[in-house]
Image (cartoon, rainbow, N blue to C red):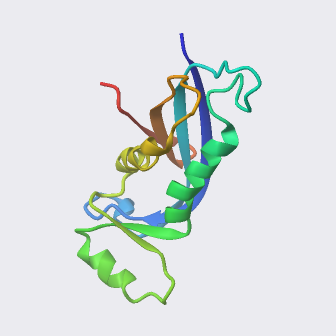
Amino acid sequence: MTTRIRRWIETDTGHRVPNHKSKCRNMHGHRYRWEVELEGDVVTEHGSSDEGMLMDFSDISGILKDHIHDVVDHAFIVYEGDEAAIQALSHMQDGHRTVIVPFIPTAENLARWAFEQVNDHISTSYGNSLRLRAFHVRETPKSWASWSAEP
């Protein structure tokens, strides 16, 4: 048996799906929720700060802040092959945050990207077999995508 925990952050982020058959081909934004799901055994080291936890929620928040929030919040994510969007964004003022990625920035692809951004940073010094189980991205209140390393 294992224990699972989740922690999330939110960002305001723009994107577009250039070849989409409908309105998502237009530049637009979302209030994304980026949710990490961890799995493992609780820390049993008596007297340790994390005793009874998989990982301290504040440590997870720090990882999400550094590797997701601070990268994409108030930024526009654009596919490297979307020449029209890259050209349009090149006219923005200095300081505009454009994040160019090698994939079309759908919720599905962003879930996998987020997983890859945080996976190497999920660790514990207590040997409690902790692992990143999945990453969930909410694009709208009724639209979610998840990525898991499991088959």
Q: Which residue is most to the right?
A: 47
- Return the residue nearer the eye: 134 or 53: 53
Residue 54 vs 143, above or below: the answer is above
Residue 9 vs 123, above or below: the answer is below
Looking at the image, which residue is at 37% across and 44% down?
A: 112
x, y percent for residue 97 = 48, 75
- Location of residue 60 (image quadrant): top right
Q: Which residue is most to the top?
A: 1
x, y percent for residue 102 = 27, 60
Q: Is residue 46 left or right of residue 148?
A: right
Residue 53 vs 121, above or below: the answer is above
x, y percent for residue 58 = 69, 44
Looking at the image, which residue is at 67% across and 36% down?
A: 56
Looking at the image, which residue is at 47% across and 39% down?
A: 135
Residue 138 vs 88, above or below: the answer is above
Looking at the image, which residue is at 68% across and 21% down?
A: 45
- Return the residue nearer the eye: 139 or 80: 80
- Return the residue nearer the eye: 139 or 128: 128
Image quadrant containing the C terminus: top left
Count every numbered label the image shows and give the total: 0
x, y percent for residue 116 = 38, 46
